Image (cartoon, helix red, strand yellow):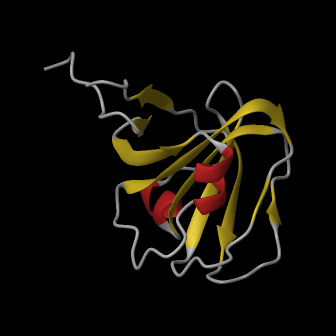
Amino acid sequence: ASTDLPPAGFAWVIFETDTVVAEVAATADERAQGLMYRDEVPDGTGMIFVFTDNRPRSFWMANTYVALDIAYMDPSYRIVDIVAMEPLITDSYPSSADAMFGLEVRQGWFGEQGIAVGAKAEIVFGVQGR
């Protein structure tokens, strides 16, 4: 049914015909943990990092075993940068522009779907208590 929403703690990040079922990391602890210690990030899944302001962002891959791409997005959910991140690298991967959201997926997924800088997502956040 069209009234269905993602479960609490998840969001659908929709790029035209492609949807990522993303875990939501909205607190400092959740953002710090990120996708650490995962053995895989299956296609169509990922994590959306939600910040309260729009500014340059930087991520690193400490304790992260899966190669990831991060799409940095502005407050209108438009991709401003996509950065490939390698496992266990503790150097940071900064955004080239201000961002309010970061969407991490398996490395190469955006390119395979033809999703590039400038693409705009629709994001449906799950509701607590459902």
**Position of residue 14 measured from the top left corner of the image (x, y, whole percent):** 41, 36
Tell me which residue sits at (58%, 76%) in the image.
64
Q: Is residue 98 above or below residue 91?
A: above
Instruction: Identify which residue is drawn at 86% across, 45% down.
Output: 56
| Residue at x-position 39% and y-position 47% | 20
From the top left corner, tell me how far across and down residue 98 is, in percent: 84, 39
Extreme residue in the left direction: 1
Q: Tell whether 60 sits left or right of 19.
A: right
Seen in the picture, residue 1 relative to 74 is either above or below; the reply is above
Foreground pick, 31 / 47:
31
Residue 109 picture location, percent across and down: 46, 63
Which quarter of the picture shows residue 49? top right
**Which quarter of the picture shows residue 44?**
bottom left
Quadrant assignment for the N terminus: top left
Q: In the picture provided, is 130 more to the left or to the right than 66?
A: left
Residue 74 image point, x, y percent: 72, 33
Q: Residue at x 36, y 44 (%)?
A: 18
Residue 101, quarter of the rendered image: top right
Q: Give the answer, above or below, for where 3 lies relative to 78.
A: above
Q: Quadrant of the C terminus?
A: top left
Count numbered badges in the picture: 0
